[in-house]
């Protein structure tokens, strides 16, 4: 999906309307508003890797920040063996959401350490973690980082969202997302071990794949990850 112009108050207000009908969106907004009540806007950043989950988080966070007249959000993009399509989307998303994008090419722990050296004001990190992701058995909405990690509050907005709920949200609100999802990728990682999901092969053309939101069984979301 291509990005045009910038996020508007009208876009943001539609999220508020959706929250009246969908409990999972309402819960995410409660968590987000609690975070914005606990911390100043310049103390919060988004961990953004261009994937669908953190894209939903960024859209939620940017919408609430806009409606609360907060300053633009900061996003950390940790660059690894990433797809050029992901790099391109992250750059365009930074413009669409008017965010301060900080890019670092190093392991996540080292990147966080350096980020806090660059801006020691940061205290809370908004994340796109969902239950079912690796290592999420005991994860809660608000959690301090583990011992040995840079001291931050991890804020998990969409912990209880399903794969299908993420896509319903992105599509309903015309949220821009990485183009790889339209090519059969359902979970994005390093380009050397991430492939289109075989369950999305187009039955009418085996060389083509259906988009990620066509996946029926969300338990197979990570089938394309090596």
Image (cartoon, helix red, strand yellow):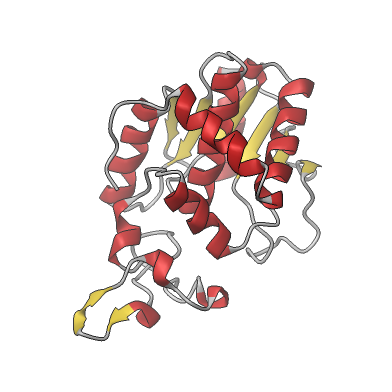
Q: Is residue 18 left or right of residue 221?
A: right
Q: Is 130 in front, or is 64?
A: 64
Q: Could you say which is closer to the camera, residue 209 or residue 104?
A: 209
The C terminus - image quarter: bottom left
Instruction: Look at the image and tell me whether residue 156 can be seen.
Output: no
- Residue lying at 53% horizontally and 23% vertically, measured from the top left: 73
Report the front residue among 107 and 57: 57
Against 81, residue 135 (above or below) is below
Residue 202: quarter of image? bottom left
Q: Is residue 191 left or right of residue 102?
A: left
Q: Tell me where residue 30 appears, x and y as whole percent.
A: 75, 36
Relative placement, left or right, of 172 versus 210 is right
Residue shown at the point (45%, 71%) measured from the top left: 225
- Say which residue appears at 36% left-offset and 29% top-offset: 96
Please say if 59 is above or below 184: above
Q: Position of residue 160 (x, y in %)?
A: 70, 57
The one nearer the camera, 105 or 22, is 22
Residue 124 appears in the rendering = yes
Residue 174 pos. (x, y %): 40, 44
- Locate residue 130, reporting x and y percent: 65, 57
In the displayed structure image, the side of residue 219 where residue 103 appears, left or right:
left
Q: Please tell me how many numbered marks the rendered image carries.
A: 0
Q: Quadrant of residue 166?
A: bottom right
């Amino acid at each position: 999906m291509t990005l045009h112009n910038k996020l508007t108050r009208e876009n943001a207000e539609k999220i508020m309307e959706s929250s009246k009908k969908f409990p999972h969106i309402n819960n995410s907004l409660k968590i987000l508003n609690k975070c914005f009540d606990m911390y100043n806007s310049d103390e919060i950043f988004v961990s953004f890797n261009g994937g669908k989950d953190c894209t939903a988080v960024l859209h939620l966070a940017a919408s609430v920040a806009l409606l609360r007249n907060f300053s633009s959000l900061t996003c950390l993009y940790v660059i690894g063996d990433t797809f050029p399509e992901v790099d391109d989307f992250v750059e365009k998303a930074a413009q669409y959401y008017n965010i301060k994008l900080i890019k670092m090419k190093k392991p996540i722990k080292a990147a966080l350490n350096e980020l806090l050296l660059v801006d020691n004001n940061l205290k809370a990190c908004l994340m796109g973690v969902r239950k079912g992701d690796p290592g999420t058995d005991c994860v809660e909405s608000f959690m301090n980082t583990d011992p040995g990690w840079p001291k931050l509050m991890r804020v998990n907005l969409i912990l209880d969202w399903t794969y299908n709920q993420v896509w319903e949200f992105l599509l309903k609100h015309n949220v821009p997302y990485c183009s790889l999802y339209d090519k059969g990728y359902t979970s994005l990682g390093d380009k050397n071990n991430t492939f289109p999901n075989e369950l999305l092969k187009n039955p009418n053309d085996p060389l083509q794949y259906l988009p990620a939101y066509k996946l029926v069984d969300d338990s197979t979301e990570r089938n394309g990850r090596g």
